[in-house]
Image: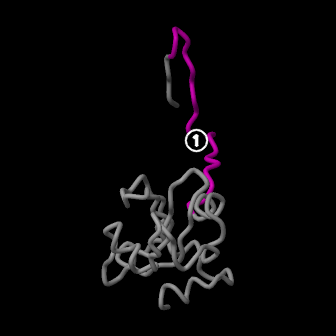
């Protein structure tokens, strides 16, 4: 049982009775950016066409175990690159601006895509 005081009122919360309705990380990524693999294989930024591998290098995520999946231009003017971080065993959705400054990222475990008929094995090499 937790007790919380807020604006001279006391609330008691039985933590065992609270349900966490947080959606899985995969759902958050796909709700925001679409199904994995549905984005582009290259992006034009400031008039220059970048492949997925070049985008990985531009945002500083080019490692031996990083594998690009897709990229999108966002309605608000930013961009997102989705890739697999092999060391962390996660899909990463990295948001960045036209100067390749990272604005944020979302991560989801690779296991959230296993066995669902997705083509994640194509990207992960499994």
Specify whether residue 8 is painted magenta: yes
Label 1 crowd bin: few (<14), some (14–19), many (20+), radius 10 Å: few
> In the figure, 63 relative to 102: above or below?
below
- Residue 52 spot, x, y in % from top left: 46, 78
Bounds of the magenta segment: 6-25
- Residue shown at the point (65%, 48%) measured from the top left: 21
Residue lying at 54% horizontally and 53% vertically, measured from the top left:
77
**What colour-coding does the image apply?**
one colour
Front-most of residues 103 and 91? 103
Residue ranking furthest to the right: 117
Number of numbered markers: 1
In this picture, is 21 found above or below 1?
A: below
Q: Residue at x 31, y 68 (%)?
A: 60
Q: Which residue is mark 1?
A: 16
Secondary structure beneath label 1:
helix
Give the image quarter of residue 101. bottom left
């Amino acid at each position: 049982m937790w007790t919380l005081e807020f604006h001279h009122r006391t609330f008691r919360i039985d933590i065992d009775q609270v349900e966490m309705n947080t959606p899985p990380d995969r759902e958050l990524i796909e709700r925001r950016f679409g199904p994995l693999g549905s984005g582009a294989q290259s992006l034009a930024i400031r008039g220059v066409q970048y492949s997925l591998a070049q985008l990985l290098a531009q945002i500083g995520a080019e490692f031996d175990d990083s594998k690009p999946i897709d990229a999108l231009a966002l309605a608000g003017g930013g961009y997102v690159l989705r890739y697999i971080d092999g060391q962390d065993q996660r899909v990463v959705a990295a948001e960045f601006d036209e100067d390749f400054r990272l604005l944020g990222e979302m991560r989801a475990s690779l296991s959230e895509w296993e066995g669902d008929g997705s083509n994640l094995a194509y990207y992960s090499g499994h």
